[in-house]
Amino acid sequence: MNPHEPLRVAVIGTGRMGADHVRRIDRVISGARVTAVVDIDAGRAQALAADIEGCTAHTDPAAAMAAADVDAVVVASPGPAHEAALLTAFAHDLPVLCEKPLTPDAASALRLMEAEQALGHRRVQVGFMRRYDAEYVRLKALLESGQLGRPLMLHNRHRNVASPPFFTSSMLISDSVSHDVDATRWLLGHEISAVTVLRPTASAGAPEGLTDPQFVVLETDGGAISDVEIFVNCGFGYQVQAEVVCERGTARIGDGRALVTHMAGRWGGTITQDWTDRFAQAYDDEVQTWVDTTRRGEVTGPSTWDGYAAAAVCEAGVRALEDGGRVAVDLVEKPALYR
Amino acid sequence: MNPHEPLRVAVIGTGRMGADHVRRIDRVISGARVTAVVDIDAGRAQALAADIEGCTAHTDPAAAMAAADVDAVVVASPGPAHEAALLTAFAHDLPVLCEKPLTPDAASALRLMEAEQALGHRRVQVGFMRRYDAEYVRLKALLESGQLGRPLMLHNRHRNVASPPFFTSSMLISDSVSHDVDATRWLLGHEISAVTVLRPTASAGAPEGLTDPQFVVLETDGGAISDVEIFVNCGFGYQVQAEVVCERGTARIGDGRALVTHMAGRWGGTITQDWTDRFAQAYDDEVQTWVDTTRRGEVTGPSTWDGYAAAAVCEAGVRALEDGGRVAVDLVEKPALYR
Amino acid sequence: MNPHEPLRVAVIGTGRMGADHVRRIDRVISGARVTAVVDIDAGRAQALAADIEGCTAHTDPAAAMAAADVDAVVVASPGPAHEAALLTAFAHDLPVLCEKPLTPDAASALRLMEAEQALGHRRVQVGFMRRYDAEYVRLKALLESGQLGRPLMLHNRHRNVASPPFFTSSMLISDSVSHDVDATRWLLGHEISAVTVLRPTASAGAPEGLTDPQFVVLETDGGAISDVEIFVNCGFGYQVQAEVVCERGTARIGDGRALVTHMAGRWGGTITQDWTDRFAQAYDDEVQTWVDTTRRGEVTGPSTWDGYAAAAVCEAGVRALEDGGRVAVDLVEKPALYR
Amino acid sequence: MNPHEPLRVAVIGTGRMGADHVRRIDRVISGARVTAVVDIDAGRAQALAADIEGCTAHTDPAAAMAAADVDAVVVASPGPAHEAALLTAFAHDLPVLCEKPLTPDAASALRLMEAEQALGHRRVQVGFMRRYDAEYVRLKALLESGQLGRPLMLHNRHRNVASPPFFTSSMLISDSVSHDVDATRWLLGHEISAVTVLRPTASAGAPEGLTDPQFVVLETDGGAISDVEIFVNCGFGYQVQAEVVCERGTARIGDGRALVTHMAGRWGGTITQDWTDRFAQAYDDEVQTWVDTTRRGEVTGPSTWDGYAAAAVCEAGVRALEDGGRVAVDLVEKPALYR
């Protein structure tokens, strides 16, 4: 790539998230343009491409990645399609921003790690966008400053207004808690060594049969405890909060209280209803960072290893949910490429 | 008085505030009992006395103060009756807790100061209860610590849900802002030298003809500016807030946010609806302090001078409201007794 | 007792808590006076009694309770002495305010329940003062209003600046978490059915060998999960916080942010350093309530059953701490007297 | 302009603000590129241009605006140079984003309004970036929703850590309060009809001779009062806060409390030290909006009229500061083009 030219990006998958990345690259951030969109629904890809100067529509990811005007790839297709798309990108040695989950299970994530190691250099940035959220970034910086001493406990709250119809009890772990798993690993710099899932009475507001909320306890190899309340039908708003308890103090993010009103006997404000509000800027910063580093020939951010570790922890979590009790997490040794 | 015996108190005036002081002395605080209640409405005084062992009912304050079993007096009758009641108390050399206003105008306050000086010692504690509120006390202590440097500005907010039917535009100054006048004088340790009253459009929620809200600017002899928003028909709650701006920082009280809820798309809490909630503890502490100091033969707290200064400032404020523009405040020289 | 006369109280134990109760009854609250103080250290009891008109000093609790001028008893001696003192009080049919813990173990608590049932009426109010704290009271009222739906989870934070020298790892459960156990039972109206204790890395700020912090997970017979972070050497302040998560919303208390400053690049305020600050008013209200109800011949508040349940849960908690894993709590059937 | 091609922008003035706009257009936002930079310091312009593909450097604004590859202009030169630059832009009918102040005085702003009216269409967006700040935008939307009723009062706080060496007492009005003037006009939808400036004792932290802080009272033609505390040497942080008081409630922005720590006896967080932190996103959104609307052939945002009104109010404010007392603001009738 010529670092003076815009990065030419193929976006694979044009569902809600993929279409949003197309809009972001086309109209919000700097230094990149969308030259190809891919969807198994040809009409959808064409409709999206029609609005963008010099953008072609495809139904086959491989065809898009083989095009001469593609420098880099955003993978936003469903999780089960990620492995094939990433292996094709590796075959063309293309840098990839891969939406989470990297893959739906630890075994396929391991295969991707091996393929990337065979290339000899990192190619993948996984879409754990909380690492680009201004509040998480400040919290991470504070922890690294050492002011508060060593982190001992992390309390996470993760609440959604309502879950989509297809959501299952194990998806609370693999789709939702996976973000808290990555946040725990990243903030603390520890790997997770065991998972326990507690099941309070299901809320009357949750669909019949869904185990919602759940209370997840993560133990880390650094001796910390990270608890996660996941509640995907809380009804009142979207909230992601984290409070870290260290040897000399605590720090908390996620209250989000910019506009305070007083009226009708109450003070307070509105609660964000959706992750698109809460994390819009984080997504913009994530993609801008990916574009900037890719144009400089670098790969940074959450790696294939991070995608693998999250998959392994979530697998253990789903087992803990189903069987009760504590489930240990066994990770392979961390390859040199990811150290 | 025998400091080992409870203080025997006559309460003059048994309206809302007087009756509340009777309850407070009888059932909440320590070291005092009510031995006489006085009201021009004989039935009301008798009904109150009937519930209290050893308490007599009167219609004449002088008779109550002449009784052998009265050590001290609480004056909670309407403001115009205060001067006569206090002079009678002075004649018996009885310590007095006098509800605000000390008197309705500066001239009568001056006469009381002269009478008290003739006694040669302080006898009066004026009921500016904010001086006993835990938040104001902490703010005062912070200012006196010098940590923030000299105070330069004070922003006061004073809001009521609704005003009583008899409330007039000038009573916003003399009944309501009088508290902020005392708070400004006490917090800053300055006298007020000029008053300006601005009149925003009256709220549609205010009774026809009432100038509500008002925005009052107080200038002090220490060079500070204290602004007061008074809004007695704000509709949503009772709020008393103060933010002091000093050379090196600011401090703010009055947000009162103990219980925070998140529901139905909103976070926040309820707003106190009444001064009885907001200042209940301040009143208890005020009266307990008065009982304790009186039993030790001491007089502390807001003095007759403070009552006079408030009356003089409020007189100027009412003139500023009526005439527009800035009105200077002229105080007599401060007598030695009050220095 | 004559409800028009002050309640005459014997205070047993004059350590920090007992002496504070003497001061409270003598100088703060209404309707009671201290007529006897008891301590095995005769000099200490005498010194305290000397300041109070009509108060005698004793070394034997039984002698004090036999005196003609004693209507009621406050037990503030060390926990192991409580059983004997309470049985003596029962023998005289005296109402008792008993500091927590009721007794140090479930077996002795059971014996006391039997003795009280033999009397045929309640005589004991246990000193779980959080039930009298204004914030907890508001939270309880909110839960009972049903506005938020059923409670599903409760997150508790309990932090002390530093632990006293004699504090052991199991005392984090039996002395500290016991408050959160009672708060959980009272707020949710559930009994606790199982306890798990997780042990994060001990803080460098904790004394050598002390397991501090601990993370305690309580399961209730109503299907709720209540987690407690207990950290008795957090170094930065005293904090008691509770966040309840219900089907339709959450509610949080304990932030305590009355005075907010902005200076030197930081906004914020001070953190209470001690429970005496945080809960001073709760103690006053607890004892005033006890005096008022006792004078009316009633017994309310936390019962012997509540003392027993807390003891049983804490016993299970200490076992969970020592053995690891989840320990079930087995309570006897609740006697009719306590329903 | 071809709306499918990036907007080609000339940036006039490459001081702190101009250079930041160059960076923003080149590396942050979408849809525009910098094709010319202009500065009287030729070396500075060349250094900036050297980093950007296809960007030329100039010392003469007119030469840059005459270039074939310039579609639009950002004016970020010193205020006195704005009139000439804008008239040149009008001569080429180029759309302009003009940093505030539009011009340093009302007379020159009037001349620009006449010139723009002669063109027959709006060409200028003035850089009042608060209108693009997410919190101000939410506050404006809330006011327009009518939920709170009519606005009656607006309390503004505007604090800087320290003023630059060249800052004069009148610049507190013309450079700093000018933002609050525009925010007041925009939020309330009123014009300002009179200004009063009060001068508290100057802070010991302010340079010798500087009247800092000042307390400014703005009266509007809609009957509202807007007070502004301006304090440019507060020492502790950069703060912009606004609280609007309406007939049925209040709303407040600017507390900015994303990360809360508890340590060493204090809770709280850091205060932004600079407007670049506080308003970075507002600037990005302002310029992105300008680029997007310009590519569509539209002009939105603060107009030349808004620049003129701010200049007229600030002129009156400086007179009020110098002479004392209240100074009325006389605006010309609003031309049809700006209605």
Image (cartoon, coloured by chain):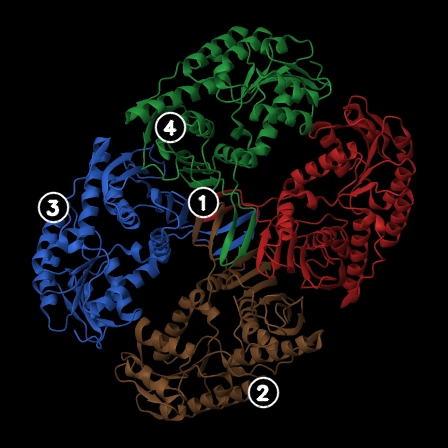
Chain colours: A brown, B green, C red, D blue
Residue B293 coordinates in the image, percent (x, y): 63, 21
At a point 25% along the width and 68% down the height, the residue shown is D292
Q: Name the residue beneath numbered marker 3.
A: D107
**Contact check, label 4 and label 2, Cβ < 8 Å:** no
**Most extreme residue toward the front, as rendered?**
B43
Q: Are marks 2 and 1 on the same chain?
A: no
Q: Name the residue beneath numbered marker 2.
A: A107
| Up-down relation of residue A230 to residue D133 (above or below) | below
**Contact check, label 4 and label 1, Cβ < 8 Å:** no
**What kind of element bears circle 3?**
helix
Q: Chain of mark 4?
A: B
Mark nearest the camera among 2 and 1 is: 2
Determine the image quadrant of residue A189.
bottom right
Using the rendered image of the protein, determine whether residue A147 is visible from the camera's viewpoint.
no
Q: Name the residue beneath numbered marker 4.
A: B169
**What kind of element bears circle 2?**
helix
- Hey, what amino acid is under mark 1? His
**Contact check, label 2 and label 1, Cβ < 8 Å:** no
Q: CA distance from mark 2 to mark 1?
A: 52 Å
Residue B300 coordinates in the image, percent (x, y): 56, 20
At a point 29% along the width and 79% down the height, the residue shown is A6
Q: CA distance from mark 3 to mark 1?
A: 40 Å
Q: Name the residue beneath numbered marker 1.
A: C262
| Up-down relation of residue A42 to residue B299 (above or below) | below
Q: Residues within 10 Å of mark 2 (few under 14, many from 20)?
A: few
